[in-house]
Amino acid sequence: MKPTPILETERLILRELCHEDTEDMMRLHSHPVVQRYTGEGVITTPEGIINKIAEKQADYRKYGYGRWATILKEGDGFVGWAGLAYLPEFDEIDVGYRFLPEFWGRGLATEATRGILSYAFNELKLKRIVAIAMKENKASIRVMEKAGMQFEKYAPYFPEGEDLAWYVMKNEILGI
């Protein structure tokens, strides 16, 4: 049984990842073009995907949010995932997205990100959300900008790592 939707946008449903998503997640995480700008390698084993889904499910339990399966309303197709992740090493909450290439260029990542930011600020009452991308990942940076996020800095994720583009949005509604 698929989990209850967390949020909906005009064209998308975002819900918790579940075991039934294993095959779709394998297509996503084993795709070298999808993984190109993620800083992660491809995952090629069912065990690797099962562990990835379990990792996301642990985030739901621990933080009350996470990376969610992103499904087209029309046709019920798995697009990829999008959502929030707590980054303990920075004490920041990150918005991120990873979609299958056949869904690129349709504005779905921007739509999902806008919906997630609205949910994060209005429902979860979060104060600040970051997004991080490799400088070469122009498409992802464009999504951040179109979603209303502001450039904050270039800084590495890992010590001695390459500089990445960091974007931010603060919850101005709460006066923070």
Image: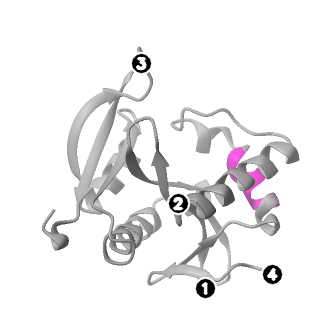
Q: Which mark is residue 159?
A: 3
Q: Residue 155, how many percent across, how many down?
A: 30, 28
Say whether disc 2 or disc 4 marks the residue closer to the N-terminus: 4
**Pick the front one: 81 or 124:** 124
Which mark identifies residue 1?
4
> Residues under labels 2 and 4: Cα distance?
23 Å
Residue 56 placement (x, y as % from top left): 65, 56
Image quadrant occupied by the N terminus: bottom right
Few, some or many residues within 10 Å of mark 1 (<14, 14–19, 20+): few
The answer for how far apart the CA atoms under marks 2 and 1 are is: 30 Å
The stretch of residues the image draws in magenta is 23-29
Compare marks 1 and 4 and give the one earlier in the sequence: 4
Residue 152 at x, y = what percent? 21, 41
**Is 15 covered by the magenta stretch?**
no
Kindly check if marks 1 and 4 are in contact, taking CB atoms under 8 A apart as contact.
Answer: no
Tell me the distance, in whole angstroms, between the alpha carbons under discs 1 and 4: 19 Å
Residue to which mark 1 is pinned: 74
Residue at x-position 35% and y-position 67%: 117
Picture quarter containing residue 135? top left
Q: Answer few, some or many: residues within 10 Å of disc 2's Cα (few below 14, many 20 plus, some between 14 and 19).
A: few
* On screen, residue 69 above or below 90: below
Q: Quadrant of the C terminus?
A: bottom left
Q: Secondary structure at mark 4?
A: loop
Residue drawn where x is 32% and y is 71% of the image: 125
Which of the two residues, 120 or 35, is positioned nearer the viewer here?
120
Residue at 40% x, 64% y is 113
Say what amino acid the circle numbered 2 marks.
Tyr
Pair 1/4: label in front: 4
Indicate which disc residue 63 carries. 2
- Give percent across and percent down for residue 69: 62, 67
Q: Amino acid type of disc 1? A: Glu
SS at circle 2: helix
